[in-house]
Image: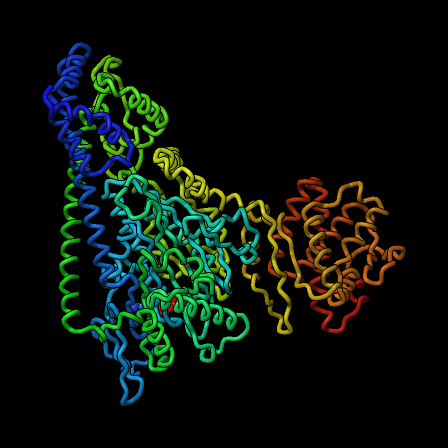
């Protein structure tokens, strides 16, 4: 062996360890040297040994195919090295480009006039590519500079083209924040979400689609998790909180924020759902949007009353060229800034408006401090800036999309908005730049842009080649590791390496199968399998017959991972149902709540009837993906402690939790107060309606959990509330037992039962009681409030009266529930007392019901008790 070969052999163990997954040693130069060595060694001893071995055991065909595979492996190693190099360069160039443009960039978009808005309105603006000239007075024009200005004719595509480079940098491992800022009704939600046609899709759907597309094209594996929250009146509310974990969304505790030792910000208990496709994100987004706080305001019929934050977390541990292994992309639809004097907001709307304005002002302060490189950045002044602490400033990218309305009426708000934008861009006022500097910068930007697109093209070419080679290799059925154990064993220094490799193979035994089922962009490449030791190793000596070539995997496995029961194109009809109080908007991407309440209610029917259904294979895929990522963490050693932090949930179990929550909880609902005009005022009235108009078993099931909670104002009302809850949940749901129907017990029970009466309802009850058959029970008149004056002849009468009263009382409390209560009562009575008895009982009930109605109707005519008694009902 000459000197050169000796050197080569000496470096072989290190080289091999690099290839077997010890990433820390794996540098591009190493890889190049490896491929060089391999080429040199191909005809040499170890290879020959393998060939001989194969010849003895298998025959010439296998030997030939193994040789081909070895060649492909060589090429793959070299291509992967090349890809890594190009990716690094591309990341660097893109980063330089974004740095030069500014890590905090501000765009402006002017909304077109609405139909109902006056076209006569005088033109307030003159716009060019990067300037807004605002006519603030007849003779005064003020100039505002932006990185880009979109006029009324700009399309969603135009906007996204400018946003895309920032989103791309999320795949490179940078934290990214994209905000939509502006006055209420200026088009923030339109820009971020868009509408249902493909051309009208906004930044969020386009951005997510682009990320998934790019991830699938790349040769790396990514783990995406999706979270959605809102900041409402200074509280963080999880919009994906499983329904099983909450009774009432409004009562969900505010989430808290914690800072990790590495400075990254985490929101405790925030739901993070693993997502593998755009369709999955879309579904989650749609469900999350229903819980958003929106309301009618003078300025916008579906005004967002909170900041809505979408977080996409990206993890990739096999892409060392990324800036960070884990990073976040935030897409934020900020609440509309408003002049409270103009919106004439009062009460809750006023408080909401104030909270929004305060946090927007805090955001402005933070960005301003970052721009002017102040020593102190006031992150702590609002929840919004606390949450975004690690994604604003430093290496992160920030994009502010400022929106303005075209109306003359909104001049003051427009000046405020543009003033905010100017503050955010503060130190980069290009008017201060000398023209030569500006020209140089422009030139550099064009160069960098060209460079990035060339490098992207190269990346795509190399990735395509790699994929093609991998497919060829699969056809050749050569999951043989790049260097066989045989050849390793032959080296005197290789014992340790062999042990670690077999360990790695053992550890990853379960993941070998996994990777073959993963979506293409998550599937490890041959070389990355080797790096982490996932390569399926079949000792040549154990082979008894030539392998059968595997079937080609479908080209787009992940695209099928969500099967929507309703065609995605029928998004609108999918969301609307007779139970829905949230009228769906016309957007394909998402429906918005238009219920006029502060916090839109979830449409429960959605969860019952339309679920994402995953096959067993897909379920496995999700769970295995997580284990795979964890395996990567463990393998990499450095990141082991991060495993616990990956508090993520797969979409399947999230949807399961949503569904299981429906029947288990007790619903605490307000009883709407009857106003003097006979209408019912309650923020949750509509939700009761939803529950009650549902028919069938579901409604029965849910009724059994129904609790009615009247508005509580004083001690007496508290008693009422308790009694009503007891009344409905114990008696209505569980008719009294036979033992209870003895006279004494019956009285006792009746006393408890009637204790809910307060002054307002007492007279009604008295009159109703008088309508009932039977004699007054004088003994039991101990309490002036409790007046159980009816004596019952037998059990049926007792039950009949009891349910009748309940029905009437509930009818009084919530008139719409009549049908359900009777239906419920009927079913229960049939179940417990048999058909005959229950028929009698229902005759009594109907009788009493008619009596009660007559009583109510005729009382106003001044007819007294005698009148009713004379009616032989
Ligand atoms: N560029 C645009 N092209 C067409 N329609 C638009 C555009 N921008 C906004 N709109 C329409 O204007 C209306 C108000 O827009 P949007 O709801 O997006 O405002 P917003 O700023 O999100 O308001 P808020 O802060 O109250 O939530 C919507 O009906 C929207 O479709």
**Residue 212 screen position, x and y as percent:** 29, 47
Foreground of the two, 42 or 303: 42
Q: Is residue 763 left or right of residue 161?
A: right
Is residue 357 visible to us here? Answer: yes
Q: Image quadrant for the C terminus?
A: bottom right
**Residue 746 screen position, x and y as percent:** 82, 48
Note whether 794 is above or below 846 in the view shown: above
Foreground of the two, 300 or 638: 638
Residue situated furthest bottom in the rendering: 139
Q: Residue at x 28, y 61 (%)?
A: 103
Q: Residue at x 24, y 14 (%)?
A: 543
Q: Residue at x 16, y 49 (%)?
A: 455
Quadrant assignment for ligand 1: bottom left
Foreground of the two, 855 or 607: 607
Note whether 602 is above or below 678 in the view shown: above
Q: Image quadrant for the N terminus?
A: top left
**Residue 80 screen position, x and y as percent:** 19, 37
Foreground of the two, 490 or 615: 490
Rendered image quadrant of residue 33: top left
Q: Is residue 683 left or right of residue 516?
A: right
**Residue 672 screen position, x and y as percent:** 62, 64
């Amino acid at each position: 062996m000459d000197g050169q070969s000796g050197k080569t052999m000496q470096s072989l163990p290190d080289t091999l360890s690099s290839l077997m997954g010890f990433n820390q040693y794996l540098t591009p130069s190493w890889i190049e040297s490896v491929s060089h060595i391999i080429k040199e060694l191909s005809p040499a001893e170890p290879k020959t040994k393998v060939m001989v071995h194969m010849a003895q055991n298998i025959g010439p065909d296998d030997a030939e195919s193994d040789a081909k595979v070895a060649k492909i492996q060589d090429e793959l190693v070299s291509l992967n090295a090349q890809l890594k190099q190009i990716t690094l360069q591309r990341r660097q160039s893109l980063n330089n480009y974004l740095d030069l443009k500014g890590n905090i960039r501000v765009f402006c978009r002017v909304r077109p006039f609405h139909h109902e808005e006056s076209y006569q309105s005088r033109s307030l603006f003159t716009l060019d590519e990067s300037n807004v000239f605002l006519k603030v007075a007849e003779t005064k024009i003020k100039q505002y500079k932006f990185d880009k200005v979109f006029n009324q004719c700009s399309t969603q595509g135009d906007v996204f083209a400018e946003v895309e480079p920032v989103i791309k940098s999320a795949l490179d491992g940078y934290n990214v924040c994209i905000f939509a800022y502006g006055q209420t009704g200026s088009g923030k939600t339109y820009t971020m979400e868009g509408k249902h046609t493909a051309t009208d899709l906004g930044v969020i759907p386009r951005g997510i689609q682009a990320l998934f597309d790019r991830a699938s094209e790349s040769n790396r594996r990514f783990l995406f998790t999706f979270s959605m929250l809102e900041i409402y009146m200074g509280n963080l509310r999880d919009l994906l909180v499983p329904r099983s974990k909450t009774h009432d969304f409004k009562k969900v505790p505010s989430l808290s924020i914690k800072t990790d030792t590495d400075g990254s910000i985490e929101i405790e208990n925030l739901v993070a759902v693993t997502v593998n496709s755009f369709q999955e994100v879309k579904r989650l987004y749609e469900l999350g949007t229903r819980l958003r706080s929106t309301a009618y305001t003078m300025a916008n019929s579906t005004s967002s009353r909170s900041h809505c934050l979408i977080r996409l977390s990206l993890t990739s541990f096999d892409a060392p060229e990324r800036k960070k292994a884990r990073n976040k992309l935030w897409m934020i639809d900020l609440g509309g800034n408003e002049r409270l004097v103009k919106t004439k907001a009062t009460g809750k709307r006023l408080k909401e408006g104030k909270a929004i304005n305060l946090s927007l002002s805090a955001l402005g302060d933070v960005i301003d401090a970052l721009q002017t490189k102040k020593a102190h950045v006031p992150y702590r002044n609002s929840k919004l800036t606390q949450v975004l602490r690690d994604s604003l400033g430093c290496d992160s990218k920030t994009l502010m999309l400022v929106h303005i309305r075209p109306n003359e009426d909104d001049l003051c708000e427009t000046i405020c908005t543009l003033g905010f934008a100017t503050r955010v861009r503060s130190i980069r006022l290009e008017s201060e730049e000398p023209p030569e500097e500006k020209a140089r910068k422009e030139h550099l930007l064009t160069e960098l842009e060209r460079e990035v697109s060339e490098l992207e093209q190269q990346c795509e070419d190399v990735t395509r080649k790699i994929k093609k080679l991998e497919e060829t290799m699969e056809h050749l059925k050569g999951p043989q590791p790049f260097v066989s154990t045989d050849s390793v064993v032959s080296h005197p220094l290789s014992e340790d390496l062999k042990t670690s490799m077999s360990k790695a193979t053992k550890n990853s035994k379960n993941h070998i199968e996994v990777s073959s089922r993963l979506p293409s962009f998550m599937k490890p490449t041959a070389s990355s399998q080797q790096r982490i030791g996932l390569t399926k190793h079949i000792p040549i000596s154990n082979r008894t017959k030539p392998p059968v070539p595997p079937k080609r995997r479908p080209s787009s496995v992940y695209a099928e991972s969500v099967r929507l029961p309703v065609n995605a194109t029928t998004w609108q009809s999918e969301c609307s149902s007779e139970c829905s109080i949230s009228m769906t908007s016309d957007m394909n991407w998402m429906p918005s709540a238009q219920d006029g309440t502060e916090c839109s209610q979830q449409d429960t029917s959605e969860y019952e009837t339309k679920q994402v259904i995953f096959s067993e294979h897909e379920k496995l895929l999700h769970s295995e993906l997580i284990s795979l990522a964890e395996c990567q963490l463990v393998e990499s050693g450095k990141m082991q402690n991060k495993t616990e932090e990956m508090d993520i949930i797969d979409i399947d179990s999230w949807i399961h939790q949503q569904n299981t929550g429906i029947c288990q909880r007790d619903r605490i609902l307000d009883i709407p107060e009857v106003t003097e005009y006979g209408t019912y005022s309650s923020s949750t009235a509509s939700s009761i309606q939803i529950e009650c108009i549902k028919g069938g078993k579901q409604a029965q099931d849910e009724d059994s959990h129904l609790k009615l909670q009247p508005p509580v104002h004083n001690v007496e009302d508290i008693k009422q509330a308790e009694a009503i809850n007891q009344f409905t949940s114990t008696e209505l749901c569980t008719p009294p037992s036979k033992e209870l129907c003895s006279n004494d017990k019956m009285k006792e029970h009746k006393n408890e039962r009637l204790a809910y009466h307060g002054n307002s309802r007492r007279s009604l009850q008295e009159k109703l009681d008088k309508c009932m058959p039977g004699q007054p029970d004088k003994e039991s008149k101990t309490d002036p409030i409790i007046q159980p004056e009816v004596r019952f002849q037998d059990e049926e009468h007792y039950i009949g009266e009891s349910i009748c009263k309940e029905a009437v009382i509930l009818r009084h409390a919530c008139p719409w529930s009549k049908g359900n209560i009777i239906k419920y009562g009927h079913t229960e009575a049939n179940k417990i007392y048999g058909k005959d008895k229950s028929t009698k009982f229902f005759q009594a009930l109907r009788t009493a019901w008619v009596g009660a109605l007559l009583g109510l109707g005729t009382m106003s005519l001044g007819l007294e008790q005698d009148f009713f008694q004379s009616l032989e009902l």
